[in-house]
Structures are given as structure tokens and as C-alpha cells.
């Protein structure tokens, strides 16, 4: 491993709640290229970057960032992206595979795999063929979460650690040089302003659940990782320039990093036009769709609706309706709760009023 002490950015002060985290932050933006498809509020840099990449470059990017996620996840807090790259290049080839397989040993998502959690994995059998490797991942993650084509391709690198290292280090350096470096220079000061504004506020008396709501606007019950939030050694919030209204978590050892769309805390006396503009675009993009507006209008008229009622009313498939409802919930325009096992949605009038006020203030009160 390269000596990070020689190349750290002083992004954290003692007890900072919101931290820029250059390497981890940029890594999160890199992931969005693989995972975000037409989600309202995601920054246009993601869409433009994906469009500029060739089909093969996009496939390679997905293979590196998703197929080998646990091999390349930044491990050191405060590192620059350049230091992160140096660390990857100094890592022995076998360690890339060891990190991946160690993570897979600990992940059990399907009920079948949960029942055998803690049992040793027979890696000799799992790695004996591409078919066995994919079958192992399907057993652990489930068929819906396993990309057979990508993981079949990944297998060829898992059994050849030297080729794996060459693939991931070469691609990440290429992506940094061609797409991410200039964008990081553009957004860095804006992210620092967001972190600085949040850290001016004393949150020491807040619980972690309260801190989550204060920073991201999300209630704890909206997340699937409440237990992780409570059990982690540290919770660090990372303002990201591209993730929009969504949140994403990354766990490094026993610390949890929560990416959120960079913005200023409510009531802040700080003015950062770039942050204001980005937040408004993120909020309005969720409304710039006829079907999403129709759903909001129906729920407003009915007071509350369940997902199956929305599906029946607009005659769309369950996956499509779930996606629209998820987008509107992530953007804060709908509030979700479970009633007798079913998801029920109500209009968040406060969020709509605040959005309209934000647009008015941005355009008329300057």
C-alpha cells in the first residue's frame, strides 16, 4: 500500500459530520455512470459522460465498478483520488481477488443463503467454472441482482488476478484522466461550501437518525440499513455533486459513508448560487414528466393511495409504477409508509411549497 500520509487532503476536522472525502466522493460519482439510468435529478454530467463513452467502454466501466466493486472500494479516509490510484497500483494482484471473495463470503441476501450464513465457502468448487461462479452469486444475491453476462465476463479476471489488477487500475486511471478529473476540479469548492455550512451547526445532541434526517431529509424508516447506521463506529455524510435527491451508502471497515446530493442546510445564511441552482434542477426534474405529475395529482385528490391502486388507475406495469413512486419518494414529493404490509403514499405538501418558494427566491429575490 502506498503511504497515504504523504497525499491527504485536510477535509475533516474533529467531530465533522459532513466531509468532502475526495477519493470516496469521486468513487461514488464513478459508480453513477454504471447504475443511474434516466433517474430524475441525477446530474447531467452522468448522462453526458455515459453518452460520450463507447458501448465497449460502458461495458468495461460496469464490469470494473460493479463486478469488482469490493476489490476497488477506497479504503482510506481523506485520500485524494490520485493517492487512491497509487494505492491500487501498489496493491498485489492477489489482494484484489482476496478482497472480492472475502466480501462475498459475508454477503447473504437470499433466504436460502441466510440460513447457511457463517458456513465456509468452497471456493475451489465456486471458481471451477464460470457457470459455478455465476450460480454462487445467484445463490448469495438472488437471480434479479446477478447480471449473468457481466459476471461471466468477470470470472475470467477472478481466476487471473494479474489480469484483474491490470483491468481495474488501467480503467480507473483512464476514466479519471478523461472524465472525472476535470469534473472534480469544477465541483470541489462547491462541495466544500456545502460541508462547511453543515458543520457550522452543532449536531452533537442529535441521534444518528436525527442527523440522517437533518442532512439528507430522509426518515430512517425510508432506508433499508437502519441497523448498520446504529452499529457503525462512525457515520460520515458525503456531499456529492451528481447523485441528486438520492442517497447511497458505502461501508469501509466499520464506518458508514452516506452520499447525499450536495446542498445547504435549511435556514443557512450561506449563499452558493451553484448549489442553489443544482438543487432546484434536481427538484424540478422529478416534476418534468407527465406520468409522475399524474400520479401526484391523483394522490393529492385521493388523500392517500396504495401502490396497487396507482397501478390500476394509470394502467401501467407494477415495475413501472414502483419506479415512478420510488422517484417521487426519493425527491420528497411523496411520503411512504407501510399499512398492513402494503406501501401507502401521501402527498408531501411541505416539499412542494418549499420547491416553489426556492424557485421564486432564486429567480426573483436577487
Image: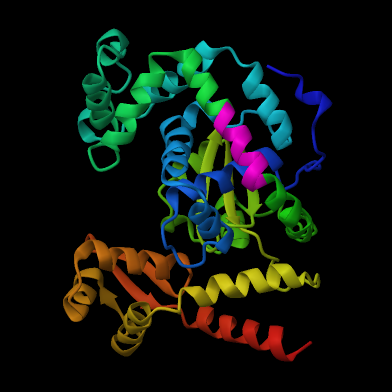
Q: Residue at x 42, y 58 (%)?
A: 222
Compared to residue 155, the image places residue 225 above or below, namely below
Name the side, left or right, on which 224 lies relative to 273.
Answer: left
Name the side, left or right, on which 183 lies relative to 121.
Answer: right
Compared to residue 170, the image places residue 220 above or below, namely below
Q: Which residues are magenta?
A: 170-180
From the top left corner, tell me how far across and down residue 91 is, in percent. Answer: 61, 16
Please state which of residues 268 and 45 is positioned toward the viewer in this rendering: 45
On the image, which quarter does residue 175 sit in?
A: top right
Q: Does residue 174 show up magenta in the picture?
A: yes
Q: Residue at x 63, y 84 (%)?
A: 359
From the top left corner, tell me how far across and down residue 18 is, in percent. Answer: 70, 50
> What coloring was used for the rendering?
rainbow
Name the side, left or right, on which 149 lies relative to 158.
Answer: left
On the image, which quarter does residue 46 sit in?
A: bottom right
Compared to residue 132, the image places residue 57 above or below, namely below
**Can residue 264 be seen by looking at this rendering?**
yes
On the image, which quarter does residue 271 sit in?
A: bottom right
From the top left corner, tell me how far across and down residue 278 is, in percent. Answer: 64, 69
From the top left corner, tell me how far across and down residue 269 is, in percent. Answer: 80, 73
Identify the image quadrant of the N terminus: top right
Q: Main secondary structure of the magenta part?
A: helix
**Can residue 233 be seen by looking at this rendering?**
no
Name the side, left or right, on which 172 lies relative to 34.
Answer: right
Q: Residue at x 45, y 42 (%)?
A: 227
Amino acid at each position: 500500500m502506498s503511504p497515504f500520509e504523504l497525499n491527504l487532503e485536510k477535509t475533516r476536522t474533529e467531530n465533522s459530520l459532513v466531509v468532502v472525502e475526495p477519493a470516496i466522493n469521486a468513487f461514488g460519482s464513478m459508480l453513477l455512470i454504471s447504475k443511474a439510468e434516466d433517474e430524475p435529478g441525477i446530474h447531467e454530467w452522468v448522462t453526458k459522460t455515459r453518452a460520450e463513452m463507447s458501448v465497449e467502454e460502458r461495458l468495461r466501466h460496469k464490469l470494473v465498478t460493479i463486478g469488482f466493486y469490493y476489490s476497488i472500494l477506497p479504503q482510506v479516509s481523506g485520500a485524494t483520488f490520485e493517492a487512491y490510484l497509487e494505492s491500487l497500483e501498489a496493491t498485489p494482484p492477489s489482494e484484489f481477488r482476496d478482497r472480492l471473495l472475502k466480501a462475498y463470503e459475508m454477503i447473504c441476501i437470499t433466504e436460502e443463503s441466510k440460513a447457511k450464513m457463517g458456513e465456509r465457502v468452497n471456493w475451489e468448487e465456486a471458481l471451477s467454472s464460470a457457470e459455478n461462479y455465476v450460480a454462487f452469486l445467484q445463490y448469495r444475491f438472488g437471480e434479479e441482482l446477478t447480471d449473468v453476462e457481466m459476471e461471466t465476463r468477470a470470472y475470467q479476471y477472478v481466476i487471473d488476478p494479474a489480469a484483474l489488477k491490470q483491468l481495474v487500475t488501467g480503467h480507473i486511471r483512464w476514466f479519471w484522466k478523461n472524465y472525472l478529473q476535470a469534473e472534480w476540479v469544477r465541483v470541489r469548492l462547491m462541495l466544500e461550501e456545502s460541508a462547511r455550512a453543515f458543520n457550522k451547526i452543532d449536531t452533537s445532541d442529535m441521534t444518528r437518525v436525527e442527523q440522517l434526517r437533518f442532512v439528507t431529509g430522509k426518515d430512517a424508516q425510508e432506508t433499508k440499513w437502519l441497523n448498520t447506521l446504529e452499529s457503525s463506529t462512525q457515520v460520515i455524510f458525503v456531499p456529492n455533486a451528481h447523485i441528486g435527491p438520492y442517497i447511497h451508502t458505502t461501508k469501509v471497515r466499520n464506518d458508514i459513508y452516506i452520499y447525499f446530493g450536495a446542498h445547504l442546510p435549511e435556514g443557512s445564511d450561506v449563499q452558493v448560487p451553484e448549489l442553489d441552482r443544482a438543487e432546484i434542477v434536481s427538484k424540478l426534474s422529478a416534476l418534468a414528466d407527465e406520468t409522475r405529475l399524474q400520479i401526484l395529482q391523483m394522490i393529492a385528490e385521493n388523500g392517500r393511495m396504495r401502490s396497487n391502486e396507482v397501478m390500476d388507475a394509470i394502467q401501467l406495469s407494477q415495475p413501472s409504477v414502483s419506479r415512478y413512486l420510488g422517484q417521487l419518494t426519493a425527491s420528497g414529493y411523496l411520503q411512504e409508509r407501510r399499512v398492513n404490509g402494503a406501501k401507502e403514499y401521501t402527498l408531501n405538501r411541505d416539499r412542494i411549497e418549499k420547491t416553489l418558494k426556492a424557485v421564486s427566491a432564486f429567480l426573483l429575490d436577487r
